Amino acid sequence: MTERFQLIEADPASAVPVTVLAESELEGWLKGQPPAIAGWAKAQGFKGKAGEVLALPGANGAPSRVLAGRAAEAADLWRIAGLAASLPEGAYRLESGAEPQAAALGWALGAYRFERYKADKRPRPRLVWPSGIDRAEVLRLAGAIHRARDLVNTPAGDLGPSALAAAAEEVGRAHGAAVAVTAGDDLLMQGYRAIHAVGRAAADPPRLVDLVWGDAAKPKLTLVGKGVCFDTGGLDLKTAGGMQMMKKDMGGAATALGLAEAIMAAGLPVRLRLLIPAVENSVAGNAYRPLDVIPGRNGKTIEIGNTDAEGRVILSDALVEASKEKPALLLDFATLTGAARVALGPELPALFAND
């Protein structure tokens, strides 16, 4: 696993040191260095700005040190993350400028590659594990995040509702969780009619994944993730451009599953429940229609205004089920509407909360 994260066990003395500097820190740092280093940095135009990288040459021409620029307010997690993709092959060690635990995790996340269909054989840099950190935590979090990214990046032809459910079952088995999957017409029998309505037109039937883990006496934490494995928009069909990236419409489910994996791997003192309504919103003769009225799990009816607003429909069934237990904390993840990104941009999440 550490190979994928480009983290290695090695003698730090044999690795190239990495110094992370903000623009305001550069001048002071250079004053303490030999004139040749200051002259090299000036000649190369290195300012310490976010994203800038400068290799200082050693006597044999190989890098003797790497300087990395950062934004003054940059979180420790991201200060060296980009170096995992930008540095040449070799062993490196963090010397200063970032908190080691966060920096190691950031490096592991920066090392991510999606290689299911095409391997990336380029030589990669390796970071020597910083001393005194919780390696197990880095591996837990990086592994869970890599899994979520792999799921989002996998095209719908290979990740329909059944494959998404299988991924959840795999995670559950690895950690001793109980996983139940209700699929196809069994959803109707169990009262999940909204999930069934959205997914019934697909060749891969809709399903609800229900994972439970932990001590029932501990506080109840429930995660719900929108698992629309592909969204055509249904009969209110999306444009070709609007449909282009809809393999990612199960990103909420991937995030919830990754978080559940990290929680279980850490052995947190909670009773965890994960609910994933997994569907493909397809077009067929039995697809649900605008102005159809669908009975929800709580007995209320839903009139469909637009079949491309499918996420809130399937989540309504899952959230009703999740709320029945009155969990201490309920978190719901969804790629619910592009309007959120229009309003807040790509950096800020849109949150609805009662706290």
Image (spheres, rainbow, N blue to C red):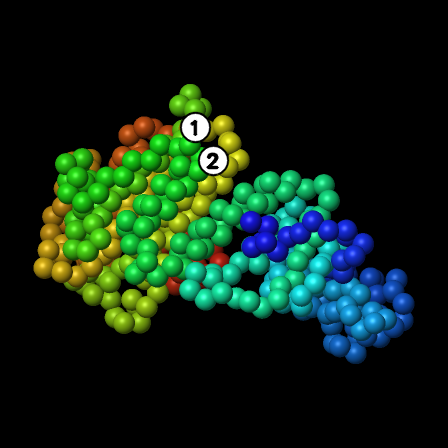
- Residue 190 seen in the figure: yes
Please provide percent x and percent y for residue 321: 27, 35
Which picture quadrant has residue 223? top left
Residue 345, placed above or below residue 334: below
Residue type, numbered disc 1: Gly
10 Å crowding of disc 2: few (<14), some (14-19), many (20+): many
Give whichever of 152, 355 is nearer the camera. 152
Please provide percent x and percent y for residue 262: 49, 41
Q: Residue at x 77, y 51 (%)?
A: 11
Element type where label 2 sits in the image: helix
10 Å crowding of disc 1: few (<14), some (14-19), many (20+): many
- Compute the Cα span from label 1 to label 2: 8 Å
- Residue 291 seen in the figure: no
Which picture quadrant has residue 27? bottom right
Give whichever of 265, 46 is nearer the camera. 265
**Residue at image mark 1:** 214
Mark sitting earlier along the chain (1/2): 1
Q: Residue at x 18, y 45 (%)?
A: 184
Verify CB contact (< 8 Å) between mark 1 and mark 2: yes
Left or right: 78 as drawn, with respect to 294: right
Looking at this rendering, what residue extends furthest in the bottom direction?
43
Left or right: 92 as drawn, with respect to 75: right
**Residue at image mark 2:** 264
Element type where label 1 sits in the image: loop
Which picture quadrant has residue 92? bottom right
